[in-house]
Amino acid sequence: MTDGDGVITGPLDRPRRFRTHDQTRVGVALLFVVAAVVVRIVGRSTWDLSLHDLAQILARMPDAVLDVVRGAFAGVVVVVVLWVLVGLAVRRRIAGALGALVAALVSAVVAQALVVAGVLIADPVLRGTTLHLVLDPRSLAAFAGAVAVARPWLGRGPRLACVTLLALCAPVLLIAGGTQLASLFLAITLGNLVGTVVLLVAGSPSSRLPAIHVLHDLERRGLDVTALRVEPAQHGPFVAHVSLVDGTALRLEVLSDDDRTLDAFSRLRRTVMLRRPGDAQRFPQLRRAVEHEALVQLAAGAAGVPTPGPLLVGEPAIGWMHLGMPEPVGAEPEGTDDLLGQFWGALARLQAARIAHRAIRPAALAVTPDGTLLLQDFRSGQLAAPDTQLDLDIAQGLFTAALLAGRERAVRSAVARLGREQVVRGATRLGPVVVPRTARGGRRHSRQLVEDIRGEVEDQCRVQALETYQATRFSRRQAVQLVLLVALTYVALPLVAQLPRTIDAVRTADPVWGVLALVLAAAGPPAAALSLRSCTTASLPAGRTIAVQVATSFVGTSTPASVGSLALNARYLTQTGRLTAGAAGGVIALQSVVQVVTHVGLLVLLAFVAGRALDVSELVPGTSVVLLVVALVLTLVGVVLAIPRLRRTVASQVRRRTREVVSELRELARNPARLLLAVLGSCGVIVAGSLALWASLLAFGAGNELVAAAFVTMVGQTLATAAPTPGGVGAVEAALIGGLAAFGVPASVAVPAVFFYRLLTCWIPVLAGYFVLRRLQRDGSV
């Protein structure tokens, strides 16, 4: 056999960003660490009670029995460690042995640091026993880290022994009378996390193609290989091109655990996102998955579908499988009428045999030198497929043919070969989500192409309007609404305890001033609509714009810093105002600038009017808070400046937004009437909120505190925008109550007045905004 020198070329290592299996290991290990920390913090009292009860039971056992258990476990640990080391040495897994050593040392160092910090505790009961060294947190973390790295390099027996040994640590600790079970779990999970990180950095067996084993497997089959060229690895199997002495060529797909993990995530994503994913049952072994692909391709060939030809299935190394076929050397598929006819003919034969390909895309097509179109890559194929999968194949075929030849020729050739009924049935399933990701291109391009294909099918098949089939479990609008409702529920739950207080406040309020406060609060959305309409030249209906501002109450309260409000206004400008995304962003930025300038101007004016009567000690945060905010801002700026790509991105965005705002400001300055209306609209929002709080104070018997209400309202609006909580909930209430106290308003009046004010300006608009948003979505306004 050859040693591979000069025969094997190309990169054999898979880049870290494509090591799905190793990345999954790190993610799972991190979840275990989080679970161990939560158990240690939350379940501390439960641990103590359970261990106390268990200690009373074990106290009745003879000491000789406990000594036997301790000694036996310590001996088993030594035997297993030696077994693992000998196994790595015999298999010549030098990389695995070195990686395990590094992981053990790093894990021990991390555990030692946590022991010093008091997070991990060495069990005092075990000191002086045979288990002291074995069940010490540092030893456990080192052993867990070494096992995490060595497991992929070991056989099934040593791998199972290591996992079993780690699982037995807990009962052995309890039998030995130990009390630090939570520390034991945390040490094991930390060591496991360190080991998986080392494995990701150094590389696991599934990250490096065993090219020499592949070469030897081919030679054992009597194939004389002259060259084996490996393509750069990406997501999916390694692809190798093999040249033989007789001049023929093979294309090998070499699969490993990375491909199984990637397939599992794809299945999970389809199960969550699609209503009927139609996936066949996942195969428990890599061998079965490769055999299934070969079987589907053989069945397709038996049905008359041109495929690459005879298959070569092999297992070059443990955990690796390869599937070989003749190299389809020829031109790239182009959109000629002959190739389109062959393509739809092959698809019609698959439909007749009820074989679903499920991954039809340009990469699954190849053309031989004599002009024959081949269909390949049956990894996702399915035999005895249901009608849904067959219709999805037609949908994918329409998209692929349109990419190659244009929508008009693609639909015409499909109708000629399949008939109108099948094409219409497939077109109803067509959508970006059913097209393989590698064939979609940009999201906007794929959506536009889908709409063009559906329109072409309606024209050529004489269909009035194609029925739209929702392939996803949730539409995008439903998903957005679900996220917003979850966020709003999370925000509102802590306020349920304040509901009785709010109800009592409403009962004791003066009804006249309460109704006036409600009317004044309702003036906010029209003022905001006036400001938005004045900042753009687009034609926006007044009533619909006011409705959008009501809807922003729901969206803005469900997102931090009112990000949702800005996004909804931008969406409204693009959908109803027919502005581009860049122009809509400029309008939103201009409105924000006008609001900030107006807000700051009024705040300075009110501070001057309030004069010395204002005690700002209740409003100014402490020195530690200010320093923390400054440190966070400086850290963020430092990170942006330190990363060149991030620095360039931020700089380009800032320059672009600045140019848009300056351009819009110049346009607004040329029209004084629009500028005046924009300022009046911004002032109207502030005045409406201020008067609503003033009326709320009067409803609960406060004096005429108009200046206090205006100043405090502006501070509260600032916090609502800057606070990290959705809608500023919690921070705004505290700021309003503290601000009123700074003006001398007693707490017995300020607290119910603020709760009543927030009910009028936050929670009632949120409830109305939800229904208004749904109406606007049905109308296509947003």
Image (cartoon, rainbow, N blue to C red):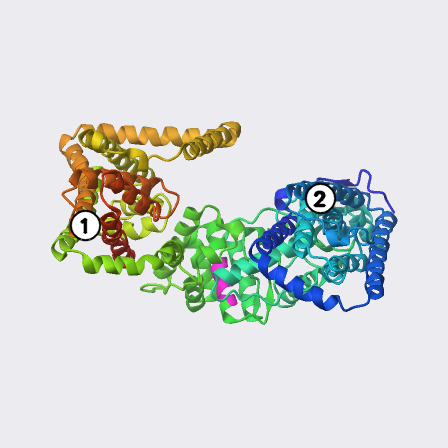
User: Circle 2 sits on which residue?
Assistant: 107
Which is nearer the eye, 10 or 597?
Answer: 597
Kind of residue sitting beneath label 1: Ser
Helix, strand or loop at label 1? It is helix
Helix, strand or loop at label 2? It is helix
| Residue bounds of the magenta highlight | 389-396
Where does residue 88 sit, x and y in percent of width and height? 83, 49
Indicate yes or no whether the magenta region holds residue 99.
no
Q: Which residue is drawn at 16% across and 40% down?
A: 706
Question: Is there a contact, CB below 8 Å, between mark 2 and mark 1?
Answer: no
Q: Which residue is drawn at 72% across and 57% down?
A: 178
Asked if residue 486 lies left or right of residue 1, the reply is left
Where does residue 373 sit, x and y in percent of width and height? 59, 55
Q: Distance between the residues labelled 2 and 1?
A: 60 Å
Number of marks in picture: 2
Which is nearer the eye, 231 or 61?
Answer: 61
Asked if residue 378 lies left or right of residue 567, the reply is right
Label 1 crowd (10 A; few <14 / some 14-19 / many >=20): many
Where does residue 551 sit, x and y in percent of width and height? 27, 52
Mark linked to residue 696: 1
